Amino acid sequence: MSYKGRDVYMVSGGVTKFAKASPDMDFRLRVKKAFDYALNDGNITIQEIDGSVASYFSDHFQRQLMAGIMVNDYLGLSPKPSKRIEGGGATGGLAFQTGFEEIASGRMDTCAVYGFETMSHVNTWKGNEFIALASDTNFDYPVGGFYTGYYAMMANRHMHEFGTTVEQLAKVSVKNHGNAIHNPYSQSPMKLTVQDVRNSPMVSTPLTRLDVCTMSDGAAVAILASGEKAFEIADREGTKPVKIASIGTGTDTMRLSDRPFGRVPLLSNEKESDYKDLKYPGIHSFRAGRTAAKEAYKGAGITDPLNELDLVELHDAYTSSEIQTYEDLGLCKYGEGGQFIDEGKSELHGKVPVNPSGGLLAAGHPVGATGIMQAVFMFWQLQHTVKKHFKDDTLQVKNAKRGLIHSHAGTGTYVAVSIMEAVQ
Amino acid sequence: MTLNPDAKMEETQKGAEVYNVDPLIVKSHYEIDYIHSYAQDSEFFRALGKKKLMGSKCTNKKCGYVYATPRGHCMICGSETEWYELPNHGKVHAFTTCFFGGEEFLSETPFNLAMIEFEGVNSLFMARLIGADAEDLYIGMPVKAKFRRNQKFSPTDVYFVPDVAKK
Ligand SMILES: [Zn+2]
């Protein structure tokens, strides 16, 4: 499998402030706010948009079928082409990649990718039930019916295989909630200690309330363009495109129980002998994440991710999944994820800042918007415009030239990884 | 033909449940019964009534992958599988105790979830584990399958308990 197509750029983005509930706006108005922000910031007119991709996860949450076209209609994009993309938690990342494909194929010169989710339509426990319906309804939903339970078992196994500790998980929560203090779009900025995380109510052993992301209302928009169009737009005042260097996507079995016990698909900085006795992925690692990273690294020519990436925004729905994902992405070897956070490598001023925005844990996780939110935050980082958008430059990663965004679904069932690069 | 400018919609006592006035937020009820077929998985659910835990095995002799959670076709080679009776004894591969849950199961908390591994079987089975508190659970813990007498035709018709001598 290899990619041949036109170069694709991101030319603008917008995000609404994520909140537990924001009933003053419906999903259409929320997207409209993010869309207008993006058009205005990119100095782009709506007439220049060739088509769109709608990103939202759950018809249960929305209780409105064809909500995607209602947004398209509200934005004034009809009768231009549009489609909806859905893939659980990875919906946003997959939709972003679909927008990439619309441009790369030569079909469109500009594409608006918009994502949204309104999770406040139901209470938190009903929301958890809706999310659990994204597990096999014959064998998994009726037994557990709770995603945190599934992730807790994966964390439990990761701890058993590699000696990962609950304190290491807690450090991810401390880092991401702390970063969010400087992100005005975030839902849960908090100054925490490891003890605070461990003392918060136990949800599903070993994961506490602060190891788990919350339900959110929110929207995000990314506007993508071909090279020619991107540089035409860049000639206008105050805009600078960011290249989407490559995309990668992986999948895995729907049921956690079906995950095989085989060999690790190696990255170019790994050897067979690194994992002699490791049965992979089992339920401790995400094969889809590794597969997506491999494809994306090949496309962008990355052979040493830790040294060739300046920052990462990854899908930390759980603190444990951030640690598991360090390994899937090859930022460290399998088994070294806990040590990676202990050594501070993923801290804001560490070797490769991970989730400087606060991630899902603290910025929020309005599912269909999340992967696009990551793209927007990454875009601002690589444009070096964090100060302009956040009114605070604490989170601006100095010399950020290349970043990775990672969007993840189910128990690691779909994973989308995209590499973005600053334009000189 | 009727052309009646005095026609009136019937007024009823049914009202709306209003949570907030500005913005106006009302309760919207939705409920549905599905006609759910277990289709090719049906035998698994029927067998639980006979105290049998059925997995499946790939019929391709060169493959022969054995699934603890049955599937009609093999994920490795695409061949059809046949039913395969699992041992009643297994081990805990991973576990958790849920203190919260989805709304449907919230009243059952706290409950233990476990991934069960079986000797000679290539995949796992997710189940409830009872008869042990959160602090009693460990990876490798021997467990045995038990079956509900009154079947609900749910995968929880089978559950696991610690495989230890009776007190
Ligand atoms: Zn087979």
Image: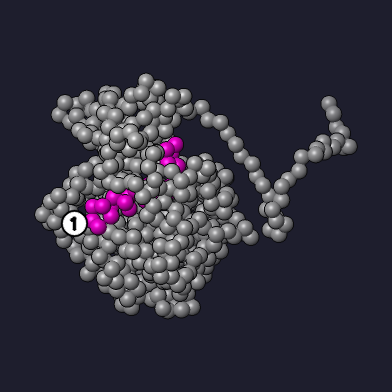
Q: What is the quadrant of the C terminus of chain B in the image?
A: top left
Considering the numbered disc 1 on the image, is that residue within a helix, a strand or a loop? loop
Residue A211 place in picture, x, y as percent: 41, 59
Give the magenta range: A141-163
Check the image and report above or below for A135 versus A76.
above
Q: Is residue B61 magenta?
A: no
The residue under the point 71% across, 51% down is B18
* Quarter occupied by the N terminus of chain B: top right
Residue A156 on the magenta segment: yes
Crowding near pointer 1: few (<14 within 10 Å), some, many (20+)? many
Q: Work out whether B32 lies above or below A321.
A: above
Residue pictured at 16% horizontal, 26% vertical = B61
Q: Which residue is mark 1?
A: A267
- The residue most toward the top is B50
As displayed, is residue B61 above or below residue A366?
above
Q: Is B108 in front, or is B13? A: B108
Quarter of image, res A135: top left
Outermost residue on the front side: it is: B167
| Percent position of residue A222, x then y | 44, 62
- Above or below, comparing residue A349 to residue A259 in the picture: below
* Residue A176 visible in the current orientation: no
Looking at the image, which residue is at 47% across and 70% down?
A190
Amino acid type assigned to the residue bearing label 1 in the image: Leu
* Residue B40 as seen in the image, left or right of residue A29: left
Q: Nearer the viewer, residue A110 or B89?
A: B89
Left or right: A86, with A279 as reference point = right
- Residue A87, given in percent of the width and then of the height, sits at 41, 47
> Which chain's residue wears label 1?
A
Q: Residue B2: in sight, yes or no?
A: yes
